Amino acid sequence: MYDVIMKAFGQTVYMVIGSTIFSVILGFIPAIVLTVTAPDGLRPNKIIYGILDILVNVFRSFPFIILMVIVIPFTRMIAGKAIGTKAALVPLTISAIPFVARVIESALRSVDHGLIEAARSFGAGDLQIIFRVYLKEALPAILSGITLTMISLIGYSAMGGAIGAGGLGDVAIRYGYQAYKMPYLISTSIVLIIFVQVIQSVGNLLYKKLS
């Protein structure tokens, strides 16, 4: 049981960290666009903001299990297959992108407008304001949002085990539920709880240091 659970734990870590990295990179772009084109942004644009805002909300509305099934053709195109740990990165990333975009947008828009106006008065351009004011001031909040994203992805990766994604969710379903082996079910649950607590603790520590 130890070997099975440790192998599954490694798969879960791979899925969570991999999808977090990709979703943060890809979610950063719409977050910046939303912040800049917002009514109180650097370059207000109702059309761009409205369209992107709707798209983010639409993709956030999909339940993860349904999303995994919908993107199977795209997953097969990217990963070469529709099941497995590597393939699970595609739907996990897609599901996290709108969440990350909204989290980063909220963090950026919470920055004091007085700082932005002060930067403008000193002749700072839009890119300088984005990277030296927005991102610098919002970094602790962004980090906190990424921590929440990772915790959500742990739950999604466990659900992904129901349709062949591997990881602790797969072990819990195949051994614990289908084979009626309660030790597997209990052990995987404990490992997931500990994993979540570790991520939350590290995130809280980094947040305090950056703040």
Image (cartoon, rainbow, N blue to C red):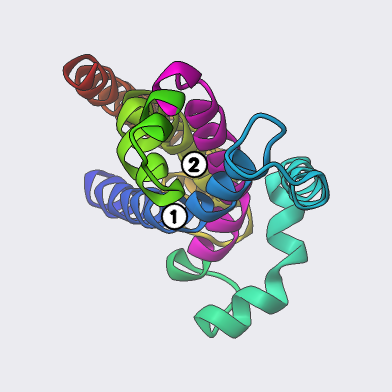
Instruction: Give, as a three-letter code, the residue at label 1.
Output: Ser
Quarter of the image holding residue 130?
top left
Pointer 1 and pointer 2: residues touching (CB < 8 Å)? yes
The residue singled out by tag 2 in the image is: 153
- Is residue 115 part of the magenta span, yes or no? yes
Secondary structure found at label 2? helix
Direction from residue 161 to residue 195 in the image, left or right = left
Residue nearest the observer in this picture, 103 or 183: 103
Quadrant in the picture for the N terminus = top left
SS under mark 1:
helix
Residue 151 in the image: x percent, y percent? 44, 32
Q: Which residues are magenta?
A: 88-116
Q: Quadrant of residue 99?
A: top right
The residue under the point 81% across, 51% down is 51
Report the predominant secondary structure element of the magenta stretch: helix
Amino acid on which disc 2 is placed: Leu
Name which residue lies at 48% across and 50% down.
28
Residue 19 is labelled as 1
The answer to whether residue 173 of the structure is visible from this angle is: no
Quick one: quadrant of the C terminus? top left
